[in-house]
Amino acid sequence: MVESMGFLEKLGSAEKLYTFDDVYIVPGRAPMDPSKVDVSTRFSRRVRLLIPISSSPMDTVTEYDMAVAMSLMGGIGVIHRNMPKEQQAEIASRVKSAPPIPTSRIYVTPDEDCSRAYDDLRSLGLRDAPLVSADGKVLGHVRAGSLRGCSGRPVAEFAEPSKAFDVRHVEDALNFLESGGSDTVAIVAPGNAYVGTVTFDSSLNRVKPSLDSEGRLLVAAAVSPFDLERARLLDRYVDALVTDVAHFHNVEAMTAAKVMAKEVSADFVVGNIGTYEAAVDALTVVERVDGFRVGIAGGSICTTSSVGGAYAPALWAVAAVRDAIDQHGAGDVPIIADGGIRSSGDAVKALAAGASSVMLGYLLAGTDEASAPLIRIGDSAYKPYRGMASRGAMERRFAVDRYTRASKRVAEGVEGVVPYRGSVVSVLADLAEGIRAGLGYAGASNIRELWEKARFGMAIPKQVPGELFRASQ
Ligand SMILES: NC(=O)c1ccc[n+]([C@@H]2O[C@H](COP(=O)([O-])OP(=O)(O)OC[C@H]3O[C@@H](n4cnc5c(N)ncnc54)[C@H](O)[C@@H]3O)[C@@H](O)[C@H]2O)c1
């Protein structure tokens, strides 16, 4: 069809590539209060989430801390691939053995001065703390009360029998804390190795982690579709593998992914893709697709649209891929909307267009758990954030992995900084609440209903709400 068109006709029939700023959700009749809206979803065919959010596999975003926090908050983190495969697998395995509750690292060591330990515990408002040896084993427990008035003696003299709980049975620890038996308990891995301290905090009840069938935190990892060895290694630990290339709709990438999908047992998510045709081809060639990561060139640090002139904004691409899935009887393959999401409102629009979840980079990059160091510029704190096809990220990739194929020499991303935003826990809690509110406005009580009920509208003339207020400031 397109081939028989003249060039002018081709230009004139340009498709409308809707972006997040082009449309809004038209409010609909809400069946319930937003607090009761169910935002649980699936990341991929078998991986269930309690909030529809994942963290992007970027080297300034997702390593151990982010992956743990994402799952603790009901989402999932995708560990980036800009490191040796052994290191990526080690991170995934540590996430799997992390306690499925928020922990801190408050403990006392045997040779610590007892009066200093007493002051430390009182300043934290704690009645007790685990006693942990220098080589990381839980030896017992120390009560602040028994340290009162002591001086110059080692903490070891005040040790009481251990109050440590196995990481595989943390519900016992929570019950013990709730019963008032203690303020703190140690969580240990098999062999009594100290993992972290759980401190009694009524807000614990509000944390609902997303877990696998064995009660462990969820984790996913990025791979190149050409890196079979990495995929095989990661497959032992992760719930999902995510092919991580800019343009998955490439015959070589899809053919390699077909081989990989047969070799691994974790859910197999492919991407990035941006069109109806890419989804149909991927479903046909790869044969096992457990999820699509959708959106090309939309990220805040991505320069693909200026380097290559190509763009498939996540909103438009999600709708196209959802239609492809529905029309090709592929069942219920979840879509992850990726790139350019700057707010919970953007996330709601992506979900309304047929996504099951959203993947975030920019919104999470400024948090404590993001894998870049905190830096100070003048009086303000920032964290570095860079595209995975930026010069720095590419150099790192080729330096750490000699098997990486160099598909590009020209960077398609930039490196910068984002303002520091504190813990990702509160960022995610706010985003989840915003998404619940969005479903409420759309008149939906869950994401499925949002797909059915959401109506899109355009403001004419195009106007951004709040613009008038800002203009008058
Ligand atoms: N989401 C986006 O919009 C976007 C855009 C650019 C880069 N990136 C990220 O940057 C990193 C590097 O990506 P990458 O694809 O260069 O990885 P890569 O160098 O590992 O390339 C992998 C393969 O993807 C295919 N491919 C990539 N770009 C192509 C193109 N322009 N035309 C045809 N085939 C192409 C090729 O098969 C290539 O061998 C990844 O983490 C990727 O997710 C993301």
Image (spheres, rainbow, N blue to C red):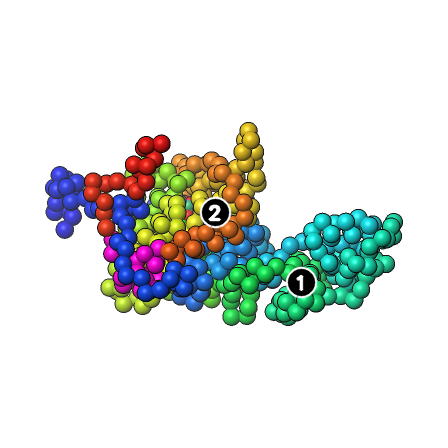
Would residue 93 be visible to someone looking at this image?
Answer: no
- Where is residue 171 drawn, in percent x and y? 61, 69
Would residue 434 be visible to someone looking at this image?
Answer: yes
* Residue in view at x 36 percent, y 32 percent: 473
The disc at residue 187 is 1
Q: Nearer the viewer, residue 55 or 283?
A: 55
Residue 204 picture quarter: bottom right
* Residue in view at x 44 percent, y 59 percent: 51
Mark 2 lies on a secondary structure that is: helix
Q: Is residue 245 magenta?
A: no
- Where is residue 276 drawn, in percent x and y? 26, 55
The residue singled out by tag 2 in the image is 364
Give above or below for 88 relative to 418.
below
| Amino acid type, label 2 | Leu
**What residue range appears in magenta?**
438-456
Q: Nearer the viewer, residue 319 or 108?
A: 108
